[in-house]
Amino acid sequence: MSSETEHTDVLSHVLLPVANEADASATAAALERYGPSHVTALHVVEKGGGVPDKTPVEQSEALAEESYAAVRSVFPDADEHTAYGRDVVAEIFDAAEAVDASAIAYRSRGGNRLLQFLSGDVSLRLVTEANRPVVALPHEDGA
Amino acid sequence: MSDEDLAKDLGPLAALTIGVGTMIGAGIFVLPGEAILRSGSLASVAFVLGGVIAMFTALSASELGTAMPRSGGAYYYVNHALGPMFGSVAGWANWLGLAFASAFYMVGFGRYIARIFGLSGSVGAGPVSITVVKLIALVGGAFFVLINYVGAKETGRLQNVIVVLLIAILTVFTLLGTLRADPSNLPPATDVVTTLETTGLIFVSYLGFVQITSVAEEIKDPGKNLPRAVIGSVVIVTVIYALVLVIMSAAVPEGFIADIISSDAENPIAVVEVGQYIQGAVMGGALLFGGLLATASSANASILASSRINFAMGRDRIVTPALNEIHDRFGTPYRAIGITGGLILLFIVIGDLTLLSGAASGLHLIIYGLLNLALIVMRYVAPEEYTPDFVVPLYPLLPILGTVLSFALLVFVAGDALLLSFGIAGAAVLWYFVYARSRTEKQGILSKHVLSRSREMPDAAVNAVASVQPDGGEYRVMVPLANPAHEQELITLASAIAKQRGGTVVATHIVTVPDQTALAAAAERSDDIDQSSQHLLDNAREDAETFGVDVETHTILSHKSYEAIFDAARTHTADLVVMGWGPNSHGSPGRAESAIDELTEAVPCDFLIFRDRGFDPSRILLPTAGGPDSELSAAVAKLLQAEFDAEVTLLNVDDDPEAGEAFLAAWAADNGLEGAERLVESGDVETAIRNATEESTLLLLGATEEGLLRRLVSGTLVLDVINDVECSVLLAEKHRKRGLLERLF
């Protein structure tokens, strides 16, 4: 890649937040065709922040490892970054800052409003509060 | 901050409220009326007694928790120390105990709702009717299960507020109550047995503290905060229970409680009536509201705690790990929570309040007894890695008292609940033998200790321990792969054996890293390793699958490839290792191994070493002079015979042909190879073997002495015969347990 595009290319270093193995495979596959130069996979371990977590830490970390492996099956050179926090969106932005990502790419997991409400869908906050470009990846069937 | 610190976000107060929040709901808002009715002025004593028994266990749980901050708490410690049979009992008791307790809390919750809205009676007709209280309990139970199913984080934080609020309400109740208290109001004391029975009933009020240990890995500075939270929560609730009970008996006229309980009111709630009587409607209302919050928070906390137990049980394969699957949207262990939820609703339908609390008490007493035993075992065996920050004082007195008192109190749990508790414990043992024993691989510290000292321990003890050992499932054949050229032959051989034994092939790619490269550094640039490894292992998988056997694949990074094989055989609990050996197989021969290693270490399981000159098992030559290693050769020959219709020839070298023939005939009969051709030669053994192999495609040799294979692989020994013959050679060495003395002489 030539040096003058390095700072302007949105996909020069993509931060890829992934929730689990299936989500990671689908998200990475959706990103692949746009040929990002570098990818950092991010898994946010959702902490209770003063109360017990939904899942044991040990299991959360295993989930993170599986997710990274799934991303690496598409992007073998992908870096990984694990964040811990109650506020998933804030952790994604902090991680983007920490790894100096050029963009955050994610794939909304859809679902109706109730499901989005119950599972704490992050789409809206991700696009409205972002401090860098956010790429919403298309779904397989919609692309 | 390290990752580990980031994962720890429960402060001392949060940890404390998990314990207090789980316990206080039951003790004070549901059971006091019943307790006072049964044991009069000794009701308070019954609660204190429960607190004391709980305290012994709290001390033990604190020590175990600081030594092993792992998910799963009580179940984990018992499983770790006493092995998976008791682990199964503790796990099931903990899981079902929490489900019974949650059902109990929800029935209490139902009473409060019914009381607030003035509901009573039953709905439905005849056999399908259900009381309003139970109906509300079902709806409430389903609601709290749903909250945990979708993983609403807000409920947990609410818990802290609820606990503080409850303590405030009860403090005011106690302070104001003291002004009205008059010792002459105290009902007459009953006898000791009745008091103990009351303790058995109300012990459900003391099962929250142990749930703190199940989230030990999330607690900040666990060495300090865990014991404080565990012990502190027991002290706090014991004091509150005792004071509230005294006030409830002393601040109202004698017979008040009895009148309430035996009154026509359908769902008498003693604490609310007392509050209303002595402090008016405001206190009555506050207590009603408090009871609602308390029972709800107890149930909510118990549902979450039980999913931790499920996780730990799944991790150890006591139950299927599929139970721990995380929901892809909610991020919760939805299956575990769903099943627990189903159990809670079932228990609400079938059990009454005393049965539910009795079963929860009984099951937890079993766990507490085992937990104290686990502590004694850990202290006695004292494994190197056992370094608790908190240490139980007056060891072994307190843990022994904890064990004895917990088990003794079981006697006073009501008959039907006791039967149910023991029934579940018995079923859990059965579960271990029928389901878990063939799956779990974890061995308890105690049985490791007994088996490692099998010479000093009485035979009966060793046999008893050995007979309940987990067998880790089916027969496992491990194949260390290094050179892709030999992969197919080795996997074919291993798969044939695994197929005949109904076992699994474990293909491991052992990647040798130069000594100069740190393993961590190698792991970082593991991408290229992964690719070549993946390719090799994929081929292995395909080859094995053509035989229809199960395959597992692993990649191992190591500096010393042949040492890694021995280690991997242990880690992956292999029953048999099939490995290639020869030029380009596993490092260069000639590497020196320390003499002491050879002396003390034989192979960790049965080993087959394959010198590959093409795998063709059609005509096998099996020279034997008896001994365990050639028995393994015989077993392998039989398996190959069954799989490939191999023709087996037995060879014995003896200058007396008749004696040789007689030996071979007997040996063949012993090893089930009667159909094999028998050949007796005289003269030099190696020459005889060499001549005989001219007709054969595969030479199957038993190691002539223990440790032979290890030396062969490490290059300290060269067997000419292996290099001289033209066919492939399979060398067998059997795993045997022997003392050092026998190896020397």
Image: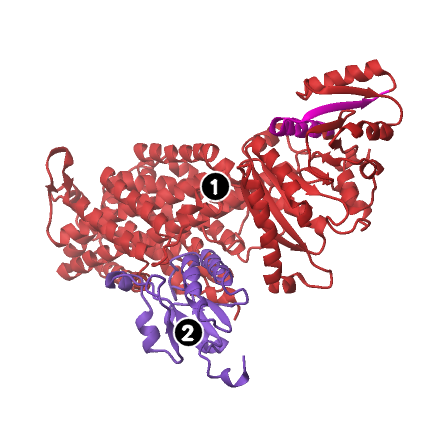
Point out residue B128 in the picture as x, y percentages from the top left corner. 15, 36
Which sits in the foreground, B376 or B217?
B217
Q: Label 2: how many residues lie within 10 Å, few (<14), some (14-19) or many (20+)?
A: many
Does residue B140 lie above or below A89 as drawn?
Answer: above
Splitting the image into 4 quarters, where does residue A142 fall? bottom left
Residue at (66, 34) in percent of width and height: B454
Q: Which chain is purple?
A: A
1 and 2 marks on the same chain: no
Q: Chain of mark 2?
A: A
- Pointer 1 residue: B87
Check the picture and name the quadrant holding the C terminus of chain B: top right
Q: Which chain is red?
A: B
Q: Which mark is residue A104?
A: 2
> Which residues are the magenta region?
B630-654
Cα distance between the residues tagged 1 and 2:
45 Å
Point out residue B69 in the picture as x, y percentages from the top left corner. 50, 55
Q: Is residue B185 visible?
A: no
The reply to whether the magenta stretch includes residue B555 is no
